[in-house]
Image (spheres, grey):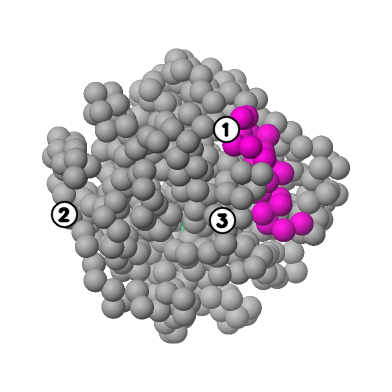
Amino acid sequence: MRYISTRGTAPILSFGEAMMTGLARDGGLYVPEVVPTLTEAEIAAMAGQSYEDIAFAVMRPYLGDTFGDDEFRRLIVKAYAGFGHAARAPLVQLGANHFLLELFHGPTLAFKDFAMQLIGQMMQAALAKTGQRITIVGATSGDTGSAAMEAFRGLSNVDLFILYPHGRVSEVQRRQMTTPSEANVHALAMDGDFDDAQARVKDMFNDFAFRDGVRLAGVNSINWARVLAQVVYYFSAAVSLGAPHRSVSFTVPTGNFGDIFAGYIARKMGLPIERLVIATNHNDILHRALTTGNYLKDGVRASISPSMDIQVSSNFERALFDAYGRDGQAVTALLGELGAGGFHISQGALEYLRSTFASGRCSEDETSATIKTFYATTGEVLCPHSAVGVHVAGAHQSATPMITLATAHPAKFPDAVEAAMGIRPPLPTRMADLYTRPERLTRVPNDLGALQSLIRERIAH
Ligand SMILES: *Cc1c(COP(=O)(O)O)cnc(C)c1O
């Protein structure tokens, strides 16, 4: 299996190389040269299998010779052993034809754990073979950072730096990033918003002297291995509702477009997914783009679903690459226009996107009302991100079962949940001491040079 860049000029890589590389050297994102398909019989055989077995079947075709079969099975088992639910990704029913896929039973209570725990295991195994040491720098709107801290803390061949927007993450998210005490993980609170943090990380990848000097690797959702790990739960959920014999649809609370892009890959692999519905909060660039054909930035506005407060959805580039017939030059030209504010999606590309994706937007009031209503009618406590999904799914009901992704545990966003329904959701007992652990963080300016100096200095020790 070979991986190519969405901008067409970076070196072609193996799975292991793409995982370590993150952002391609031409500024693009790695995608498989060909998406492997599973037969109906192979999908049918997943019925009743464990999450780990389904994970092996779904991901194995992408790995080439990066890991042996037994080794890969062991890495999967280790990755999900720390989850607080035996099913890993349980499905609960909200209404006659509406289901909720609970992706928040991992160690940091958000779906990011599914990919991050596995990537931690895979990187460690790959680095142990070469004895190499790498520096991982990631930007986070909250959940990626905490998941990465949890996955990489204490690993011997990795230094991890997480940039998060100062004052714009929830207290639980911040504490999950600032309380790990291991010396190889560093929480950096940066001035600015998530897009600023993500832009500085991209700047570091585009500075080849720095990139090569510190052996920079990335774990943001631009990393193909993360997308791949998320493909698995689309299969496990759809199969438990009757796939491949019955189609399903998914609604996905969306920010950086990584999670829903994994659904798109599952569909390309042969999973019968009718619709993938993009659910946005009031930062609705993707909903506007799909509706009007214009992908136009208009500034990030803080919301009660902060992990989706994003205007530039990095992974959308991967969908554009396919929508433009895998023309790297066309993608490069479009993304070039983004600096000046945005671009127009051609009619043909728009039709391609609309044949798979639908979209909807949820206001702040609608988010709160959804939390309140669904608690009253189902007993299910939704986090604000999941509530955005549930609200948007309501407008896309049909005879096809709808599965909405619950992307975080409500206790990760207790203020918003309490304001909406009057009850403060408690943390699961396995992490009840979070509020009493000491915090460790460094305040940093939104300045590339200053960030690079700090990283060079810290990894020298
Ligand atoms: C990251 C995140 C999202 C958005 O997922 P993307 O892959 O960036 O689209 C939604 N909800 C929660 C809770 C998240 O942590």
Q: Amino acid at mark 2?
A: Arg
Q: Residue at x 56, y 56 (%)?
A: 78
Check contact, mark 2 vs mark 3: CB within 8 A: no
Left or right? Give the position of 346 relative to 127.
right
Mark 3 Cα within 10 Å, few/some/many (few <14, many 20+)? some
Return the mark for residue 22: none
Q: Quadrant of residue 91?
A: bottom right
| Vertical arrangement, residue 239 with respect to residue 226, above or below | below
Q: CA distance from mark 2 to mark 1?
A: 38 Å
Left or right? Give the position of 152 relative to 262.
left
Is residue 384 visible from the viewing direction of this image?
yes
Depth check: give the residue in front, 162 or 117. Answer: 117
Circle 1 sits on which residue?
Answer: 66
Q: What stretch of residues is rendered in magenta?
A: 49-69
Left or right? Give the position of 258 relative to 157.
right
Q: Residue at x 35, y 68 (%)?
A: 172
Q: Measured from the top left, where is residue 204 in percent x and y?
A: 27, 32
Q: Measured from the top left, where is residue 151 in percent x and y?
A: 43, 54
Q: Residue at x 41, y 43 (%)?
A: 220
Q: Measured from the top left, where is residue 43 in percent x and y?
A: 79, 45
Q: Earlier in the sequence, mark 2 or mark 1?
A: 1
| Vertical arrangement, residue 191 with respect to residue 336, above or below | below
Depth check: give the residue in front, 18 or 126. Answer: 126
Q: Secondary structure at mark 3?
A: helix
Is residue 317 visible from the viewing direction of this image?
no
Q: Nearer the viewer, mark 2 or mark 3?
A: 3
Q: Amino acid at mark 3?
A: Lys
Q: Amino acid at mark 1?
A: Thr
Q: CA distance from mark 3 to mark 1?
A: 18 Å
Return the mark for residue 78: 3
The overriding secondary structure of the stretch rendered in magenta is helix
